[in-house]
Image (cartoon, rainbow, N blue to C red):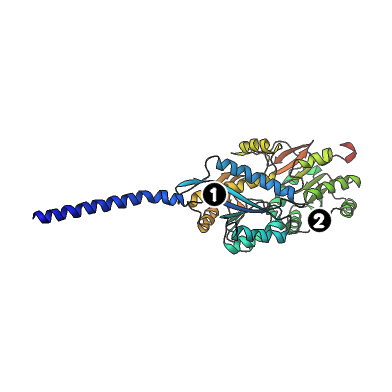
């Protein structure tokens, strides 16, 4: 009996030692898992840092960088799989404003830089090559300045954007026209179509929606993405007695267009210049000649929404100007990624993709969610702004506006 008791005692000690070892091992599992966490969550972005679209690229980068700064000030994004917060990092590669180089750089981000997820660059024709690659490798992608509806009808699963579609942009333009008292409302529209997907689709929806609301497209002219001479288009619109101009030029093109309109003495009652008029350099380059121009950049720094004031403050401190519309929507892209990663609790691309698809959150663009095709939907605010006496004012929607629409535009010699 004594011998048996000794054996039981020995086995008891072994069992206790085993339990302690298991408990010790269990206690070390979490730190060991945490130690394998990446130093940063890498977001890869191919963007125009040089070339004719570099100014637009800078707007997007500024929005991304401020958002990353704000998130990393709290330690980063909490990832449950690792039990810790992990800072965000953006790996930027320059596409030199070239679509072919965009594709090459995207391949490098995936295969060499090993980024976790993709962010979009600037200008739709430069972004389109990014979408197919993100889909090919099943890497979640969130980007702005993608007005395309065609790209979002291809069945992509990993592509998301909070940016306004061409239909939304045209709808807001016509809503603003409808808000003008009927007795002075303009009815004759000139559309100058830039020959890229965004411009072509915008023209298609403008024809359809304008006709439904009783407006006439009296001038419909085209120009190349690198064109700098608009004189023939202006002369045609002037001959057609167009009262309103709608177009989507690059920033340098937009400035050149206004200067040529003044030279040829064509001053429509209202001018909607997408993309080119989105930045404070518009007024610095054009002065009073840039007034009366309306534009829809997808966001406005006057918005009375959570987080906008903080973004404005830090943006002005960093760049000495008011935030551009693309920078605001870029900031929202980072907000969406951070929220999705935290809800996914992992860096697994499929889990993060599903989390983005189920987004339901407040951003500096307003409440954000996504349609099944990846395009933003819901109550996010669809804006229209206008240059008034050298200042960019929010005129739409009226409950968010910082000023009323200034209409009609004065002739050039009266400004």
Instruction: Give the quarter of the figure containing the C terminus.
Output: top right
Query: Is residue 152 shown to the viewer in this render?
Result: no
Circle 1 residues within 10 Å: few <14, some 14–19, many ≥20: some
Of residues 282 and 203, which is closer to you in this image?
Answer: 282
Residue found at x 86% / y 53%: 230
Residue found at x 85% / y 53%: 228
Above or below, comparing residue 277 to residue 124 in the picture: above
Circle 2 residues within 10 Å: few <14, some 14–19, many ≥20: few
Quarter of the view holding residue 179: top right
Quarter of the view holding residue 46: bottom right
Query: Is residue 241 shown to the viewer in this render?
Result: yes
Residue found at x 16% / y 52%: 9
Pinpoint residue 400: horizontal percent, then vertical percent.
66, 38
Residue 347: give its label: none
Tell me: 355 left or right of 256: left
Pinpoint residue 279: horizontal percent, then vertical percent.
74, 43
Determine the CA span between mark 1 and mark 2.
Answer: 39 Å
Q: Nearer the viewer, mark 1 or mark 2?
A: 1
Sequence-wise first label, 1 or 2: 1
Pointers 1 and 2 in contact (CB under 8 A)? no
Q: Secondary structure at mark 1?
A: loop
For disc 1, the marked residue is 40
Residue 226: give its label: 2
Pinpoint residue 359: horizontal percent, then vertical percent.
54, 51
Q: Secondary structure at mark 2?
A: loop
Instruction: Give the quarter of the figure containing the N terminus.
Output: bottom left
Quarter of the view holding residue 374: bottom right
| Farthest left residue in view | 1
Of residues 121 and 160, which is closer to you in this image?
Answer: 121
Residue found at x 55% / y 48%: 338
Pinpoint residue 190: horizontal percent, then vertical percent.
82, 52
């Amino acid at each position: 009996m004594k011998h048996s008791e000794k054996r039981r005692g020995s086995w008891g000690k072994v069992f206790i030692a085993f339990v302690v070892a298991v408990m010790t091992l269990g206690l070390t599992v979490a730190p060991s898992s945490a130690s394998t966490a990446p130093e940063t969550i890498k977001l890869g972005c191919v963007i125009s840092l040089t070339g004719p679209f570099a100014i637009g690229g800078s707007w997007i980068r500024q929005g991304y960088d401020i958002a990353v700064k704000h998130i990393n000030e709290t330690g980063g994004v909490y990832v449950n799989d690792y039990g810790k917060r992990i800072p965000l990092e953006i790996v930027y590669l320059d596409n030199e404003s070239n679509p072919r180089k965009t594709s090459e750089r995207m391949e490098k981000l995936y295969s060499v830089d090993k980024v976790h997820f993709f962010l979009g660059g600037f200008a739709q024709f430069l972004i389109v090559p990014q979408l197919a690659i993100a889909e090919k490798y099943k890497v979640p992608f969130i980007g702005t300045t993608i007005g395309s509806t065609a790209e979002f009808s291809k069945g992509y699963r990993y592509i998301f954007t909070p940016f306004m579609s061409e239909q939304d942009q045209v709808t807001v333009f016509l809503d603003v026209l409808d808000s003008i008292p009927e007795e002075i409302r303009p009815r004759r529209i000139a559309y100058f179509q830039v020959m890229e997907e965004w411009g072509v689709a915008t023209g298609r929806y403008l024809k359809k929606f304008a006709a439904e609301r009783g407006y006439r497209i009296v001038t419909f002219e085209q120009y190349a993405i690198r064109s700098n001479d608009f004189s023939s288009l202006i002369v045609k619109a002037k001959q057609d007695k167009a009262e309103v101009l709608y177009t989507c030029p690059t920033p340098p093109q937009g400035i050149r267009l206004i200067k040529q309109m003044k030279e040829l003495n064509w001053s429509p009652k209202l001018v909607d210049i997408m993309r080119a008029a989105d930045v404070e350099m518009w007024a610095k380059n054009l002065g009073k000649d840039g007034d009366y121009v309306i534009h829809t950049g997808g966001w406005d720094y006057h918005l009375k929404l959570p987080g906008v004031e903080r973004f404005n403050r830090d943006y002005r401190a960093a760049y000495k100007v008011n935030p551009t519309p693309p920078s605001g929507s870029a900031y929202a892209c980072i907000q969406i990624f951070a929220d999705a990663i935290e809800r996914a609790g992992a860096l697994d691309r499929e889990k993060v993709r599903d989390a983005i698809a189920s987004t339901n959150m407040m951003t500096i663009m307003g409440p954000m969610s996504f349609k099944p095709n990846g395009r933003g939907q819901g109550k996010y605010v669809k804006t229209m702004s206008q240059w008034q006496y050298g200042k960019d004012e929010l005129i739409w929607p009226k409950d968010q506006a910082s000023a009323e629409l200034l209409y009609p535009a004065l002739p050039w010699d009266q400004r």
